[in-house]
Image (cartoon, rainbow, N blue to C red):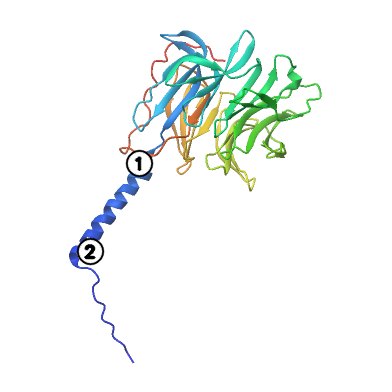
C-alpha cells in the first residue's frame, strides 16, 4: 500500500527570503570575525639601541598597543629595565632594573610611568620575571646580595607584603646552574621553568606552588624560554638543535610535543602567546614576527633598529575585524639610529 503524504509549506516565500537573508548576514559576520581577524592587546618589551630623544640606552622599556590598525606605535617609558611582565589588568608593569652591579624589581603605571615603585626589599641578581594571574605574586630566579651564585633558586614575592622566599631547592653541587625562563599557569597554581642540568642540558619542570612538588616535563634536550598558553593546555618553548633551534609546544597532560618551525641559531628569540592562544609573537634580534597556528604562516611585522629583549603580551585583548589584506604593522615608531648588538 502506498501512502501519500501532502507536505504543506511551513513558511511563505517572503519568510524564506527573510531567513535566507539572515543566514547570509550571519555568514558574512562569521567570515569577518574569523578569517579577517587580527590579534589585539598590548606589548611590553625592552630594546637595546639608540633613540633620538633618549640617546644611547641599555635595554629601555617600551610598550605598544595592537588595535587592528596598520600602524604599531612604540611608546618609550623612559626607564631602563629588562624582563617586563604585565600585571593582570595592565595597570602595572613589572620589570628588573640593574644599578651599581645589583638588581631590583620595580613597577610602574604604563599610563603614567614617571614614578617607579621598588618591590624587592633586598637587592640581588634577579632574572626571568613573571607575574601571577591574580597579580598578587611575582616569580623570578636569582640570589640576594647576601648569597652566592650557587644559591640561585626560584623565588616567589608577595606584592602586598614585599616578603619573598625561595620555592626550589636545586642542588648545585658547587656549580651555579642557570634557569632559562619562568611562566605561571593560568590557574596560578603552578610554575613552569627551564633549568640547566649536568651535561649541558636544559630541562623543563613544573612546580606546584602550594606543595612545592616538582615534576619533570622534558629531558635529554636543551629546552628553554617556556611560556604557558592562555588555556593552560600547552607550553611554548624553544628547543636547541645542533644546526638550528625549533619553536615547539608541549601538551601539559599528554606530554605530546608538536614542532612549529625552525629558526637560525643564536639570534635572540623571545616569544609570547596572543590573548586567545591562536597566535604567538616572537623576536629575532630587531625583527618582530607573528605566527598563526591555524595556517602555520609567519608574518614579519616590523624591523627595529635595536635588539628586542623579552616580549610580554598583555592578555586583555579581543578579536577585532579588519579589512582583508590589511597589514597589522608597517612602522614601529621613533626608534632610530645605530645600535650595538649584545
Residue at image point 28% right, 85% down: 4
Residue 48 visible somewhere in the drawing: no
**Place of residue 177 in the rendered image (x, y in percent of width and height, measured from the top left):** 73, 24
Location of residue 335 (image quadrant): top left
Residue 118, located in which quarter of the rendered image? top right
Gap in angstroms between the C-alphas marked 1 and 2: 29 Å
On the image, the x and y values in percent for residue 266 come to 59, 24
Q: Quadrant of the N terminus?
A: bottom left
Q: Earlier in the sequence, mark 1 or mark 2?
A: 2
The structure residue drawn at horizontal position 18% and vertical position 63%, both measured from the top left corner, is 14
Crowd band around label 2 with a 10 angstrom C-alpha radius: few (<14), some (14–19), many (20+)? few
Element at badge 1?
loop
Instruction: Mark yes or no: residue 311 visible.
Output: yes
Instruction: Give the foreground label among 1 and 2.
Output: 2
What secondary structure is found at the residue carrying circle 2?
A: helix
- Quarter of the rendering containing residue 225: top right
Work out which residue is located at the far bottom of the displayed protein and give it. Answer: 1
Say which residue label 2 marks: 16
- Residue 212 image point, x, y percent: 71, 36
Residue furthest front as drawn: 161
| 269 sits left or right of 38 in the view | right
Residue hosting label 1: 36
Amino acid at each position: 500500500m502506498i501512502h501519500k503524504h501532502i507536505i504543506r509549506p511551513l513558511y511563505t516565500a517572503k519568510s524564506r527570503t527573510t531567513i535566507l537573508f539572515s543566514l547570509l548576514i550571519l555568514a558574512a559576520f562569521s567570515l569577518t570575525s574569523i578569517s579577517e581577524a587580527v590579534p589585539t592587546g598590548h606589548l611590553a618589551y625592552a630594546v637595546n639601541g639608540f633613540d633620538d630623544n633618549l640617546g644611547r640606552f641599555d635595554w629601555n622599556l617600551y610598550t605598544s598597543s595592537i588595535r587592528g590598525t596598520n600602524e604599531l606605535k612604540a611608546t618609550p617609558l623612559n626607564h631602563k629595565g629588562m624582563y617586563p611582565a604585565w600585571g593582570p589588568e595592565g595597570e602595572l608593569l613589572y620589570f628588573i632594573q640593574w644599578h651599581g652591579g645589583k638588581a631590583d624589581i620595580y613597577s610602574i603605571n604604563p599610563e603614567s610611568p614617571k614614578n617607579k615603585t621598588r618591590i624587592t626589599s633586598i637587592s640581588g641578581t634577579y632574572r626571568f620575571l613573571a607575574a601571577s594571574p591574580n597579580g598578587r605574586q611575582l616569580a623570578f630566579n636569582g640570589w640576594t646580595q647576601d648569597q652566592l651564585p650557587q644559591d640561585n633558586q626560584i623565588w616567589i614575592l608577595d606584592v602586598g607584603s614585599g616578603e619573598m622566599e625561595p620555592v626550589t631547592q636545586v642542588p648545585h653541587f658547587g656549580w651555579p646552574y642557570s634557569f632559562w625562563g619562568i611562566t605561571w599557569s593560568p590557574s596560578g597554581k603552578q610554575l613552569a621553568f627551564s633549568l640547566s642540568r649536568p651535561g649541558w642540558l636544559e630541562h623543563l619542570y613544573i612546580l606546584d606552588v602550594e606543595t612545592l612538588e616538582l615534576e619533570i616535563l622534558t629531558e635529554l634536550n636543551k629546552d628553554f624560554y617556556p611560556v604557558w598558553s592562555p588555556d593552560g593546555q600547552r607550553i611554548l618553548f624553544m628547543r636547541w638543535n645542533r644546526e638550528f633551534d625549533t619553536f615547539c609546544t608541549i601538551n601539559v597532560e599528554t606530554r605530546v610535543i608538536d614542532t612549529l618551525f625552525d629558526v637560525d641559531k643564536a639570534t635572540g628569540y623571545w616569544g609570547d602567546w596572543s590573548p586567545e592562544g591562536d597566535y604567538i609573537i616572537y623576536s629575532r634580534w630587531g625583527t618582530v614576527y607573528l605566527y598563526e597556528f591555524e595556517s602555520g604562516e609567519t608574518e614579519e611585522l616590523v624591523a627595529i633598529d635595536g635588539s628586542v629583549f623579552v616580549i610580554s603580551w598583555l592578555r586583555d585583548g579581543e578579536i577585532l575585524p579588519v579589512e582583508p589584506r590589511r597589514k597589522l604593522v608597517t612602522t614601529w615608531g621613533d626608534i632610530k639610529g645605530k645600535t650595538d648588538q649584545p
